[in-house]
Amino acid sequence: MEARINARKVAPQAIQAMLGLEKYLHDTGLETSLRYLIQYRASQINGCAYCLDMHWKDAKAQAESDERLYMLDAWRESDLYSERERAALAWTEAVTNISTSHAPDEAFEDLKKQFSEKEIADLTLAIATINSWNRLNIALRTVPGTYQPGKVHQELKKTA
């Protein structure tokens, strides 16, 4: 596969704006492991190979287990995830599939049991952000396999 366009080169200000969102999300206090799980799950749903490669590598670099990453597609049938993670994963699926799910009240009620209003807003922004990255990388055919763990964290330090 060959990339269609390198957005970093032709639209660097747009990428910097997206990285600004990532910087904000990094500083929200949401658990890093939770953010990786929702990024990975949304990327599975959307079929974004570049983001799957990236978030697998970053999660592993933060000591996430292979088993939890392998089982993520079937998280409902696994006891590997906390109630907080389950609520976040259900919300991730609802927001990612919003055209068919319309973010159901049941998923939101479960979310409210585990997260504060601020955390819900931040979590929803994190889901919207990974969905934007997925769409950008899929549409422009960003080539997977070259991402080095921690690269995004290095870029976030530059945006500070």
Image (cartoon, grey):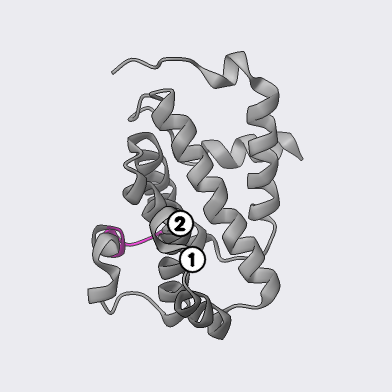
Residue under the image location 37 percent in, 55 percent down: 41
Which residue in the structure is indicated by mark 2? 98
Q: In this view, does 147 lie to the left or right of 160?
A: left
Kindly check if marks 1 and 2 are in contact, taking CB atoms under 8 A apart as contact. Answer: yes
Q: Residue 135 versus residue 150: which sits nearer the camera?
A: 135
Which region is colored magenta?
Answer: 62-69
Residue 62 visible in rendering: no
Residue 118 visible in rendering: yes
When asked about the image quadrant of residue 149, the answer is: top left
Where is residue 102? Give x, y as percent.
47, 63
Where is residue 112? Give x, y as percent.
57, 81
Residue under the image location 38 percent in, 47 percent down: 43
Q: What's the residue type where badge 2 is placed?
A: Ile
Residue under the image location 73 percent in, 36 percent down: 159
Vertical placement of 98 versus 106: above or below?
Answer: above
When asked about the image quadrant of residue 126, the answer is: bottom right
Residue under the image location 55 percent in, 20 percent down: 7
Whichever of callouts 1 and 2 sits on the residue coming sooner in the sequence is 2
Which residue in the structure is indicated by mark 1? 103
Vertical placement of 47 versus 8: above or below?
Answer: below
